[in-house]
């Protein structure tokens, strides 16, 4: 049984982008049990040209391995390999013909998953990734190309957020009209509004209220005078 890599045990690699998890990524869902004959794999690949791999499960429904289309075709192109494996159980093909797949927990972030996938052996770096759904205890297959595309979307979303933040900051540049008495600010529509409201609408700033030492002394004096 292959245990999935989780977010907490992943070489201390931390995601720098807050975004979606692997559970939200488009996937393929094709399984075979270990008792099927290996020729079933060839049949599945021939029936579906878009299929990038097949997940192999043991009798308990746990992950035994993954057979990718690319490596399967490479293996079967060698002399006598097709005749050697076709009438044997899938588990023998997995055991002797394929490396252990990268299995990741569905709660892991996309950036972290890409980092782990790209750190594999160069021969395996673009192999599909197996993702475990922790709720239903099912296994899905995600193509490396899909992971990279989803990561690109996350970076674009982050860049869009940064551009929005920058545009808000730029709105505060230049000369701002402020009333010398009540301290209200004239906005873009030529209306006057409170300083706090203006800054909240044109930046990410939030406000809490307090008293500076000078105002505190002044207010205390006024309070004492009002009591006398």
Image (cartoon, grey):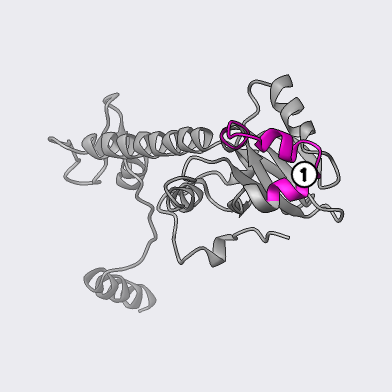
Please tell me whether residue 86 belongs to the stretch shown in magenta.
yes
Closest to the observer: 92 or 149?
92
What count of labels does the image hold?
1
Tell me if residue 142 comes above or below residue 45 in the rendering.
below
Helix or strand or loop: what does disc 1 sit on?
A: helix
> What crowding class fits label 1: few (fewer than 14 Cα within 10 Å), some (14-19), or many (20 or more)?
many
Residue 163 in percent (x, y) is at: 30, 35
Q: In this orientation, does residue 78 appear?
A: yes
Residue 96 in percent (x, y) is at: 66, 51
Which residue is at a point 86% across and 46% down the rendered structure image?
35
Closest to the observer: 199 or 120?
120
Closest to the observer: 26 or 139?
139
Q: Is residue 13 left or right of residue 131?
A: left
Position of the N terminus by quadrant: bottom right
Which residue is at a point 47% across and 46% down the rendered structure image?
114
Q: Residue furthest left?
A: 175
Q: Is residue 18 left or right of residue 50?
A: left
Q: In this orientation, does residue 133 appear?
A: no
Residue 189 in percent (x, y) is at: 30, 24
Q: Residue furthest front?
A: 80
Instruction: Tell me the magenta residue range.
Output: 74-94
| Image quadrant assignment for residue 78 | top right
Q: Is residue 140 left or right of residue 128?
A: right
Tell me if residue 177 comes above or below residue 89 in the rendering.
above
For disc 1, the marked residue is 90
Please tell me whether residue 61 belongs to the stretch shown in magenta.
no
Position of the C terminus by quadrant: bottom left
- The main secondary structure of the magenta stretch is helix
């Amino acid at each position: 049984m292959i245990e999935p890599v989780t977010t907490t045990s992943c070489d201390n690699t931390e995601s720098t982008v807050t975004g979606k998890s692997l559970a939200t990524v488009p996937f393929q869902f094709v399984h075979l049990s270990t008792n099927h004959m290996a020729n079933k794999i060839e049949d599945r690949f021939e029936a579906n040209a878009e299929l990038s791999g097949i997940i192999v499960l043991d009798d308990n429904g746990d992950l035994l391995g993954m057979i990718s289309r690319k490596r399967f075709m490479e293996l079967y192109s060698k002399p006598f390999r097709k005749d050697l494996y076709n009438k044997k159980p899938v588990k023998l093909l997995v055991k002797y013909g394929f490396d252990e797949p990268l299995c990741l927990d569905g709660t892991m972030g996309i950036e972290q998953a890409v980092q782990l996938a790209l750190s594999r052996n160069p021969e395996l770096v673009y192999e599909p990734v197996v993702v475990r759904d922790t709720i239903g205890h099912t296994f899905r297959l995600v193509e490396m190309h899909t992971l990279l595309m989803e990561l690109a979307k996350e970076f674009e979303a982050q860049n869009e957020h940064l551009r929005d933040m920058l545009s808000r900051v730029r709105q505060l540049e230049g000369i701002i009209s402020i009333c010398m008495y009540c301290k209200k600010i004239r906005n873009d529509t030529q209306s006057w509004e409170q300083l706090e409201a203006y800054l909240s609408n044109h930046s990410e700033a939030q406000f809490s209220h307090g008293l500076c030492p000078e105002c505190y002394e002044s207010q205390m004096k006024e309070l004492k005078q009002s009591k006398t």
